């Protein structure tokens, strides 16, 4: 029988209260064979732990380093210009809360360049993340009236175009990061997500287009963010050739509740993340689609591995995080890490 093409892994961002060692111990006890730690778990010394210390921490537990989750600092970097305070908890230096948006952006750009250096030293060529609100909050919310272009009353005879300005802003603000990623052979894998620079497949393909088809621009597939009309199948078929990373996550939509209400309490929200087995999504079909678009083969080629991670990000409004995540690891191990068909089921008929 063929060997499974996937292995169970877990995202570290939600488990930031744990040290790297504690996170790996937790993940291994639940049945994971690899993890995707957050950038914060790698902090130590003047900035980061040494590559040797990180490698040794994984080797001592016989676990694989499947990627580095850098969602938070990337989002801050591309959102700082808006002056938002919602990224403050993610600042790589708390003292930055006293600085200008320009200094916040510059500090996170410098940090991310160093994080990519460490990633390359660790031979990790996949960096899941998401770009921030480069096009502004109006476009990020998809405000349906579309007042995104018109007269600029601050300048006589002037005009504004938020979409055009956003395109120019994204290309300029990400140029240094993209160049460094390309120099190091790293794929920067955007998680198509509300409140980012690309919340749909078409948005992401637009980013690729305005950046001249930049090879470093990848996708971190996550079906749990397809809850406003675009199905996960439609989304990932459109961007399939750029999927280099994959989260496994599920959700439910509570019928009759408003999706965009200003409700911070998760149990009251219309969309809620869930354990993997009881949400609205069919996880089997999702990981089969990932095979169809070439994710595992692409990941294995870039990372030089024999299997690709299915990175658990199981969360719940009602269940304890550690319980829910451990249950998710077991679910992936027992249900989604299957041997892949080498041919058609019809091949043996009539033999």
Image (cartoon, rainbow, N blue to C red):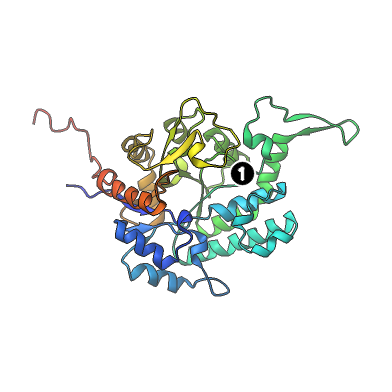
Rendering coords of residue 137 (x, y %): 67, 39
Figure disc tally: 1
Up-down relation of residue 208 to residue 12 (above or below): above
Residue 73, by quadrant, is: bottom right
Check the picture and name the quadrant holding the C terminus.
top left
Residue that sits furthest to the right in the current view = 156
| Viewer-side residue, 345 vs 132 | 132
- Residue position marked by numbered label 1 in the rendering: 211
Residue that sits furthest to the left in the current view = 351
Q: Is residue 7 left or right of residue 198?
A: left
| Viewer-side residue, 190 vs 193 | 193
Residue pictured at 54% horizontal, 61% vertical: 116
Up-down relation of residue 60 to residue 186 (above or below): below
Rendering coords of residue 323 (x, y %): 36, 52
Residue pictured at 70% horizontal, 42% vertical: 168
Residue pictured at 29% horizontal, 46% vertical: 331
| Viewer-side residue, 154 vs 264 | 264
Rendering coords of residue 39 (x, y %): 51, 61
Which element is circle 1 on?
A: loop
Up-down relation of residue 11 to residue 224 (above or below): below
Rendering coords of residue 110 (x, y %): 64, 62
Residue 303, by quadrant, is: bottom left
Q: Is residue 18 visible?
A: yes
Q: Is residue 330 left or right of residue 325?
A: left
């Amino acid at each position: 029988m063929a060997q499974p093409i996937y292995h169970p892994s877990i995202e570290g961002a939600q488990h930031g209260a744990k040290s790297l060692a504690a996170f790996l111990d937790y993940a291994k006890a639940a049945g994971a064979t690899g993890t995707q730690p957050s950038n914060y778990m790698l902090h130590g010394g003047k900035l980061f732990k040494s590559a040797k210390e990180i490698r040794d921490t994984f080797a001592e537990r016989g676990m694989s380093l499947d990627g580095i989750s850098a969602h938070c600092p990337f989002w801050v970097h591309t959102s700082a210009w808006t002056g938002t305070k919602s990224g403050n908890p993610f600042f790589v230096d708390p003292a930055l809360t006293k600085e200008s948006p320009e200094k916040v952006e510059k500090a996170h750009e410098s940090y991310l360049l160093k994080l990519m250096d460490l990633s390359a030293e660790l031979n990790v060529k996949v960096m899941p993340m998401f770009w921030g609100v480069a096009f502004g909050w109006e476009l990020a919310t998809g405000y349906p009236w579309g007042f995104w272009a018109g007269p600029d009353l601050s300048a006589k005879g002037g005009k504004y175009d938020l979409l055009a300005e956003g395109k120019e802003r994204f290309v300029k603000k990400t140029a240094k990061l993209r160049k460094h990623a390309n120099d190091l052979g790293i794929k920067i894998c955007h998680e198509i997500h509300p409140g980012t620079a690309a919340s749909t497949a078409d948005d992401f393909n637009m980013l690729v287009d305005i950046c001249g088809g930049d090879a470093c621009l990848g996708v971190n597939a996550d079906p749990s963010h397809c809850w406003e009309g675009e199905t996960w199948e439609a989304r990932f078929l459109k961007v399939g050739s750029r999927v280099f990373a994959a989260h496994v996550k599920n959700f439910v939509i509570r019928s009759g509740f408003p999706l965009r209400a200003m409700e911070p309490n998760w149990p009251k929200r219309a969309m809620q993340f869930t354990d993997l087995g009881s949400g609205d999504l069919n996880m089997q079909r999702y990981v089969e689609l990932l095979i169809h678009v070439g994710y595992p083969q692409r990941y294995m080629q870039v990372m030089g591995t024999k299997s690709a991670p299915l990175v658990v990000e199981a969360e719940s409004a009602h269940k304890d995080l550690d319980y829910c995540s451990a249950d998710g690891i077991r679910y992936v191990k027992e249900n989604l890490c299957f041997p892949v068909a080498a041919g058609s089921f019809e091949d043996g008929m009539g033999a």
